[in-house]
């Protein structure tokens, strides 16, 4: 009986040790753009598009989909506030599982392989519109930039990529 209790106690301690080892990690560290750099990025994006004659809104989100910075350019239509956020949110969430770099890549994949005919429940804040670009630092996604207001998603995408390229060296 004593051996059975002792063996049971050893097993219990081993299990508790294993479980607490899993829980012991506690905190994680996630990289994201600093507030000044996120604000600079939306400013660069709006300015890049304005030089081409496009009035746009730019939104930066972190990987949790939380807005970090937003700038509505002069003359950008009101709907661009939401649309730019949806593009950024979608790029931050839909692109990660397949290592895609933008909502453009998601849209191209969806065009080649349409979803099943089973009705899908729409996900809040998700769009397949072109103009959301994943922000990468050190080979890892750290957020996304969404742009809306140019006369086509491909132009939103171009402005986003040009602006990200301007700050890329400072994201290390």
Image (cartoon, grey):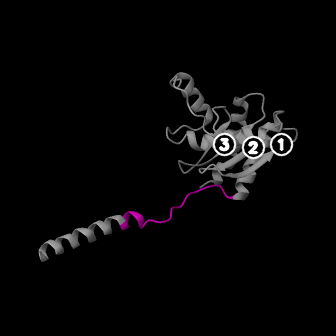
Q: Earlier in the sequence, mark 2 or mark 1?
A: 2
Q: Provide residue 28's location: percent of width, then percent of height.
A: 51, 62
Q: Which residue was labeled with disc 2?
A: 58
Pointer 2: residues within 10 angstroms few (<14), some, or many (20+)?
many
Q: Which residue is mark 1?
A: 73
Would you say residue 122 sits in the magenta stretch?
A: no
54 lies left or right of 144: right
Residue 132 image-quadrant placement: top right
**Part of the protein shown in magenta:** 20-34
Query: Magenta span: helix, strand or loop, mainly?
Result: loop
The label on residue 88 is: 3
Q: CA distance from mark 2 to mark 1?
A: 8 Å
Marks 2,1: beta carbons within 8 A: yes
Quadrant for residue 78, please give it: top right
The part of the image, by quadrant, that contains residue 147 is top right
Query: In the displayed structure, does residue 7 sit left or right of residue 72?
Result: left
């Amino acid at each position: 009986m004593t051996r059975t209790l002792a063996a049971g106690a050893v097993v219990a301690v081993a299990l508790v040790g294993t479980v607490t080892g899993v829980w012991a990690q506690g905190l994680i560290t996630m990289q994201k753009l600093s507030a000044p750099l996120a604000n600079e990025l939306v400013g660069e994006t709006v300015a890049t598009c304005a030089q081409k004659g496009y009035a746009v809104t730019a939104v930066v989100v972190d990987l949790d989909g939380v807005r970090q910075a937003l700038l509505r350019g002069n003359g950008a239509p009101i709907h661009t506030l939401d649309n730019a956020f949806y593009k950024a949110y979608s790029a931050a969430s839909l692109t990660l599982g397949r290592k895609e770099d933008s909502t453009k890549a998601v849209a191209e994949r969806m065009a080649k392989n349409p979803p099943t005919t089973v009705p899908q429940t729409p996900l809040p804040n998700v769009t397949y519109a072109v103009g959301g670009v994943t922000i990468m630092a050190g080979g890892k996604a750290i957020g996304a930039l969404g742009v809306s207001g140019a006369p086509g998603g491909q132009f939103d995408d171009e402005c986003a990529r040009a602006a990200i390229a301007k700050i890329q060296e400072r994201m290390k």
